[in-house]
Image (cartoon, helix red, strand yellow):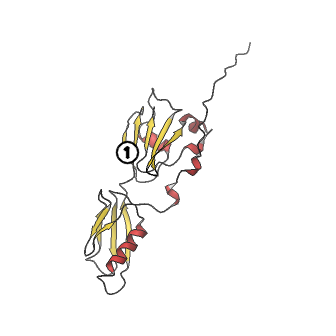
Amino acid sequence: MTLGIVGCAATLPSYDYGTEPDPRKQDYVIGPGDVLRVNVWQNADLTCEATVRPDGTITMPLIGEIRGAGNTATQVRDGITKRLAAFVKQDAIVVVSVQAVNSYRFTVSGNAERAGMFSASQFITLTEALALAGGPNRFANQNDIVIIRKADGGFRRIPINLKAILSGRAPEMNIVVLAGDTIYVP
């Protein structure tokens, strides 16, 4: 006698995961808490290290406040160079570098072993974020995880089936977590 076991595979959500941004493919966007190093060539008095405040700005000698958050290091450099032109006779050579990434934070909530707010020094995927939270606990529904992401003035819900990712049936669901994302494990 042969015994057959038939299991019902969970239906995969119909969502285009390819449309979600991958921040690893573009310049890093500075956020509050990041530490910037501003070097003004041959002008030690204007060279400084600054932490981006919660309002998104940094303070520099001579020029004062300048927007950091929401910009790339190149955009911040261009803004500083333009503002310095009013004070410096020759064109200033400015280099802006990100010394510490502190704004890449996300939340894992619901039925995770260690739900809470997490940060990382590099971009991570959904499965890596869940691993930081200790993974789903024994009460979790791994088929109905949701990433809640700010988008277009509102929020977008991205359905995730963790079992399908881990089995290899849906690797495209293992998207990169963005700063500000909330991963909800029901």
Could you tell whether 7 is left or right of 158 in the image? right
Residue type marked 1: Phe
Residue at 38% over, 36% down: 115
Q: Position of residue 153 (x, y in %)?
A: 43, 51
Identify the residue at horizontal 35%, vertical 64% (top origin). Answer: 68
Quadrant of image for the N terminus: top right
Instruction: Give the number of callouts.
Output: 1
- For the residue pair 97 and 56, the one nearer the viewer reads as 56
- Residue displayed at 25% across by 76% down: 62
x 29%, y 59%: residue: 53
Q: Secondary structure at mark 1?
A: strand
Q: Is residue 20 left or right of residue 120?
A: right
Residue 101, compared with residue 90, is above or below; it is above
Q: Would you call the spot at circle 1 few (<14 residues within 10 Å), some (14-19), or many (20 or more)? A: some
* Quarter of the picture holding the C terminus: top left
- Where is residue 127? Give x, y as percent: 50, 42
Q: Position of residue 159 (x, y in %)?
A: 53, 39
Residue matched to label 1: 118
167 above or below 26?
A: above
Q: Residue furthest top?
A: 1
Q: Which of the 4 image quadrants contains residue 74?
A: bottom left
Residue located farthest toward the bottom when viewing the structure as drawn: 89
**Location of residue 90 with respect to 45 vertically, above or below:** below
Give whichever of 138, 173 is nearer the camera: 173
Residue that extends furthest to the right in the rendered view of this protein:
1
